[in-house]
Amino acid sequence: MNAASFKRRLNWYPVFLALGIRIERISDDFLETDVAMGLHWYNRNYVGTQFGGGLYAMTDPFFMLMLMQCLGRDYIVWDQAASIDFVAPGRGRVWARFRLDATEIERIRKEAENGAPLRPVYHVNVTDDDGAIVAKVKKTLYIRKKKPK
């Protein structure tokens, strides 16, 4: 699937629609993804700031999905663990910008060649329009090359 149709499908995902999460950009090589979420009446918490569950949801699947696209069908890629630290209240539009590089993809391919699982850790910050950090997210993935059939 190409990046444009992948982005279109993700933007119609019901959870993202319900929270006002929008995938703004996916690079053609799937190494970069930009996700935004505006502040609306339906995703505010009791004190009028971004709901923490929405902040996490906007970061949840992207490293996994990007790696699945980059590595291909010969690999199993799962989210294994995550943590989020809320740094400041989100009072408007917030962003998460996910970045991988080609050398990381090649490193994973080499290290997974023997079939042993890898558990790389990735970090992404959720920032506001001014670039101030709203939340810090840590994701641990499980990656393994599939056994030949």
Image (cartoon, rainbow, N blue to C red):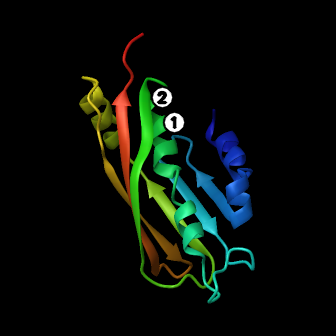
In the rendered image, residue 111, in percent from the top left (x then y), is placed at: 24, 32
Q: Secondary structure at mark 1?
A: helix
In the rendered image, residue 145, in percent from the top left (x then y), is placed at: 36, 26
Q: Residues within 10 Å of mark 2 (few under 14, many from 20)?
A: few
Say whether residue 20 is visible.
no
Q: Residues within 10 Å of mark 1 (few under 14, many from 20)?
A: some
In the rendered image, residue 65, in percent from the top left (x then y), is placed at: 52, 43
Give the residue at x 64% y 69%: 37
Give the residue at x 69% y 66%: 19
Q: Is residue 16 left or right of residue 101?
A: right
Q: Secondary structure at mark 2?
A: loop
Residue positioned most to the bottom? 47
Q: Which residue is mark 2?
A: 72
Three-letter residue code for mark 2: Gly
Pick whichever, 136 or 99, lies toward us: 136
Q: Tags 1 and 2 in contact by the CB under 8 Å rule? A: yes
Q: Is residue 16 left or right of residue 80?
A: right
C-alpha distance separating marks 1 and 2: 5 Å
Three-letter residue code for mark 1: Gln
The N terminus appears in which quarter of the rendering?
A: top right
Q: Which residue is mark 1?
A: 69
Residue 95 against residue 50 in the figure, above or below: above
The C terminus appears in which quarter of the rendering?
A: top left
Q: Is residue 120 left or right of residue 43?
A: left
